[in-house]
Amino acid sequence: MEERLGTEDRNERTMQMDEMPLRNLLQIMNQEDAHVISAVKSQLPQIEQAVQAAIESFQNGGRLLYAGAGTSGRLAVLDAVECKPTFGMGADRIRAVIAGGQKAVTEAVEGAEDDYDTGVRECAYLKVGAKDTVIALAASGRTPYAIGFLKEARARGAKAISISCNKDSLLSEQADIAIEPETGPEVLTGSTRLKAGTAQKLILNMISTAAMVGIGKVYQNLMVDLQPTNEKLVDRSKRIVMEATNATEAEAMQALKLANNAVKPAIVMLLLDCSNEKANQLLAENNGFIKEAVQRK
């Protein structure tokens, strides 16, 4: 008989879920969600190691790659695609693959998660190598696609990281760094889009955001490498420049115009009263960190 996993157990608090008053059900769901925070907290040392690995990959010209199936894969896709408008990091630097391909983002692709060999092949297709960091996600920790991808990545010299919600999982066995927030039984038995999904999302938030801080994509607490691809982000770019420099709206708009709408050099130009060319030179000399560029002019 297959080993029973914590994420598949029945939750004793919701055995009569179908008979509960709505308010009681929502209260229990909220209380169960609160357990996720402590589960993630217990994994902070491992999450820190994962962030350091991602930073090193970016600094060495490598990539951060995610792989998963179902909810785990969709959460990975969400995190990866948001890094382009937020941090200016495209699919050549951070990317997610999901079992079943693009179709699986919006609908279930039956059997895709059970295909170990496809995980191996897709890792090889992406030419994963020693400069890369690979994070494979599976709430159960036993998804063949994720295991195949991570095992192949590790064999190719990449830093291999797992995120699963059960202790000592099969996925963890293939990892250099195993992140295992034990979220326990779901309110709805086996529905790991709930607590397990929330835990995975929180961890991905930490890893990608902290890694971007570590490579100079953040100044103070401002996203200074965002891509102003719509009106909202154009306005945000202006406000970021104003916040970072205490410039007026007119001054910020003029600096952005001179910097071809790039926030970082616009900030440096205003802080140092220098040209766009000089601002970009200083940023290049200081690995894109605004604070260092300004301090070491």
Image (cartoon, rainbow, N blue to C red):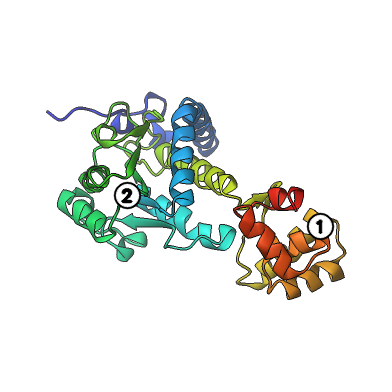
In the rendered structure, the answer to whether residue 284 lies left or right of residue 147 reads: right
Front one among 72 and 277: 277
Quadrant of res 141? top left
For label 1, the crowd category at 10 Å Cα-Cα, with few meaning under 14, some 14 to 19 and many 20 or more, is: some
For label 2, the crowd category at 10 Å Cα-Cα, with few meaning under 14, some 14 to 19 and many 20 or more, is: many
- Residue 263 in sight: no
Q: In which quarter of the image is the N terminus?
A: top left
Q: Do the residues labelled 1 and 2 touch (CB within 8 Å)?
A: no
65 above or below 89? above
Q: How far apart are marks 1 and 2 (CA)?
A: 43 Å
- Residue 286 in sight: yes
Q: Residue 250 location in percent, x, y?
A: 86, 71
Location of mark 2 (residue): 68
Amino acid type for the residue under numbered disc 1: Leu
Q: Is mark 1 on a helix, strand or loop?
A: helix
Front one among 5 and 296: 296
Amino acid type for the residue under numbered disc 2: Gly
Q: Residue at x 33, y 57 (%)?
A: 97
Q: Residue 56 location in percent, x, y?
A: 46, 44
Number of marks in picture: 2
Q: Which residue is drawn at 22% across and 52% down?
A: 119
Location of mark 1 (residue): 271
Q: Residue 181 location in percent, x, y?
A: 41, 30
204 above or below 12? below
Front one among 1 and 116: 116
Q: Residue at x 75, y 52 (%)?
A: 294
Q: Which residue is drawn at 18% across and 49% down?
A: 114
Q: What element carries label 2?
A: strand
Circle 1 or circle 2, nearest the eye: 1
**Dot 1 or dot 2, earlier in sequence:** 2
Front one among 154 and 42: 154
